[in-house]
Amino acid sequence: MKIILLLFSFIIFQFQARADGTSVELFRTINERLSHMEEVAFFKAQNHLPIEDIERERIVIHRAIVSARDKGLDPDSVEDFFNAQISVAKAIQFRYRADILSQPSSQKPKDLQKELRPCLLSLGDQIIQQMIMYIKTYGSFKSIQFADFDAEINVRYVTASDKQLLFRALQKVKHLPVN
C-alpha cells in the first residue's frame, strides 16, 4: 500500500511539473508581448499618435477570435482575454507616456508598422497556440497558478490589479463546446 501511495504521489508530481512548465511558457509569452508596450508608446509619442486605436484593437481581437475558433477554443473566452490584454497594454502605454513627458529621449523609436506590430501579432499567435496546448492537456487554469503568473509578469508599469485582470480572463479561456 505504501508503494502504491508513493507511486501515485510521484505521478501527480510529474503531472503538475509538466503543467507548470507549459503554463510558465505561456505566462512568459504574455510577459514578452507586454514588454513591447513601452516601445509602442514611445513610437506613438514621437509621432504624435494617440495611444488608443480602436480600429487596430478590432483587428487584433478579430484575428484572435478567428484563430481561436479554428483551433478549437471558445472565441468569446479568447476575446475576453485579448480585451484584458489590450487594456493592460494601453495602461502600460499611458503610464510610460506620462513618465517620458518629464524624461524626454533622443532615441529613435522602433517602427510600429515594420517592427513592432509584426512582432506583437506573432506573439499573439503564440499565446493562442500555448493556450490550446495547455487547455487540451490540463483543462482550465487554477487559482494556485496565480503565484507563477505573478512572478512571470514582471513588465514595468504592470500593476497587481492588471495581473489579476489578465489571470482571471485567462482562467475563463476554454474549449469550444462539443455539439
Image (tube, grey):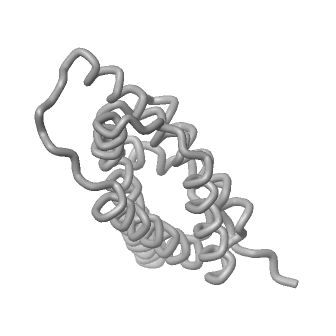
Note whether residue 131 is visible: yes
At x 66%, y 58%, the residue is 79
Residue 49 position within the rendered picture, expressed as x and y whole percent measured from the top left: 42, 38
Q: Which residue is most to the front?
A: 48
Q: Quadrant of residue 13?
A: bottom left
Judge by depth and name the residue closer to the eye, 89 or 172: 89
Q: Position of residue 170 (x, y in %)?
A: 58, 54
**On the rendered structure, is 143 left or right of 93?**
right
Q: Residue at x 21, y 46 (%)?
A: 109
- At 53% from the left and 46% from the top, the residue drawn is 86
The answer to whether residue 88 is above or below residue 10 is above
Toward the viewer: 49 or 169? 49
How many numbered callouts? 0
Q: Is residue 114 above or below residue 148?
A: below
Residue 1 appears in the figure = no
Q: Quadrant of the C terminus?
A: bottom right
User: In the image, residue 30 lies at what x, y percent?
Assistant: 41, 55
Q: Position of residue 117 (x, y in %)?
A: 38, 61
Closer to us: 74 or 100: 100
